[in-house]
Image (tube, rainbow, N blue to C red):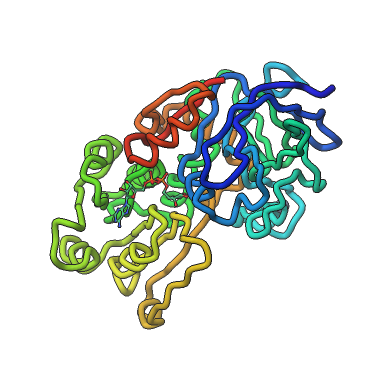
Amino acid sequence: QVIKCKAAVLWELNKPFSIEEVEVAPPKAHEVRIKTKEYVQYNPSETKKNLCGGSAVKNLPANTGNVEESVLSSSPGDKVIPLFIPQCGKCNVCKHPEANLCLKFQLKEPRGTLNDGTCRFTCRGKPIHHFLGTSTFTQYTVVDEMSVAKIHADSPLEKVCLIGCGFSTGYGSAVKIAKVTQGSTCAVFGLGGVGLSVIMGCKAAGAARIIAVDINKDKFARAKQVGATECINPQDYEKPIEEVLKEVSGGGVDFSFEVIGRLDTMMSALLCCQEAYGVSVIVGVPPHAQNISMNPMLLLTGRTWKGAIFGGFKSKESVPKLVTDFMAKKFSLDQLITHVLPLEKINEGFDLLRSGMSVRTILTF
Ligand code: APR
Ligand code: ZN
């Protein structure tokens, strides 16, 4: 049966969301309809960029949102987290032991539909597109079975929702992609929610020094709370930040992370890692259709330059494990949550984000 419910719909790029009544069609084969029980994480940075005209939301109007934790309508009581990268389990990437970018992921050519090419939402007589296969700014959504993970029945939804995107992206970049080593020195550029999660990963991996870099010094206190050992504002120095970092680390850091999404800081992060063995990881999403030109000597000397989406985690199998780790108190998510707002105030949440005042806002339904 079709369900009518409340949702935040983006009719046009660079315009606020509008709260609407939408119709949500029943799931087809290999799909599940999810009721957003209480909370949804909203992934501010992604959507912010999309609102500014990035590539992911080409198909407007879209019902956007990244990560939601919900109850499966088919078996009430099951807690789940929707996955913006699916894990089909059958493609070459899913079968590869290390990779996570399932070939069913509509990254470069987003269609704004479920896997079968059609939409489950309508509003005011018009079809509404899906966003990254999740569409979670709504009381009910429909996702493909490969885009949802069942999690521990006792999970606190208002916290573990962060595992669906920002936290795992940062944490995995440190522990899984860079493979930060015990006693190492790390530099983290950008101290938003994802950068803070990188710091937590570096700390969990036993880094001895974690140097946090940001042009907003208001970000430093929280960075220290999650594990940064020192904080640097590039604007306090005349020389380029990579030179400063090479100096303070005695020749270059072991691991560096760009968690902003800027080409200049991606280059600085590469340059500040030790030339013979440094590893630099791109975590931030770069501006659409821009290139970096670089001297190959920077890599020929021995550096490694890599990147990953969602911290390299295979989504469907890793998300439940990360939730279990959270329940076992292997990491905390409290420092990442600064605001809680009802769905109706979604636009206020984006204002908080753009001003740099929030880390992550949890929406309540
Ligand atoms: N140098 C240093 N820090 C900077 C600079 C700069 N030139 N420009 C911005 N920053 C800082 C901001 O002050 C802010 O603290 O980078 C931080 C970015 O944080 P957020 O905008 O909150 O972003 P976040 O949600 O952490 O995501 C970061 O990772 O997964 C990606 O899409 C995501 O590209 C985004 C990035
Ligand atoms: Zn796959």
Report whether residue 278 is seen.
Answer: yes
Residue at the spot 51% in from the left edge and 62% down from the top edge = 288
The residue closer to the viewer here, 121 or 301, is 121
The residue closer to the viewer here, 262 or 72, is 262
Total marks drawn?
0
Residue 151, image quadrant: top right
Report whether residue 327 is seen.
Answer: no
Residue 54 in picture, x, y percent from top left: 54, 55
Q: Is residue 142 left or right of residue 295?
A: right
Q: Is residue 276 left or right of residue 9?
A: left
Residue 266 in picture, x, y percent from top left: 37, 64
Residue at the spot 36% in from the left edge and 43% down from the top edge = 192
Residue at the spot 64% in from the left edge and 45% down from the top edge = 132
Q: Locate the N terminus by quadrant.
A: top right
Residue 316 in picture, x, y percent from top left: 65, 40
The residue closer to the viewer here, 106 or 333, is 106
Residue 301 sits above or below residue 265 on the image:
below
Q: Is residue 85 left or right of residue 172?
A: right
Residue 4 sits above or below residue 273 on the image:
above
Q: Is residue 71 left or right of residue 1?
A: left
Q: Locate the C terminus by quadrant.
A: top right
Residue 335 in picture, x, y percent from top left: 35, 31
Residue 44 sits above or below residue 185 on the image:
above
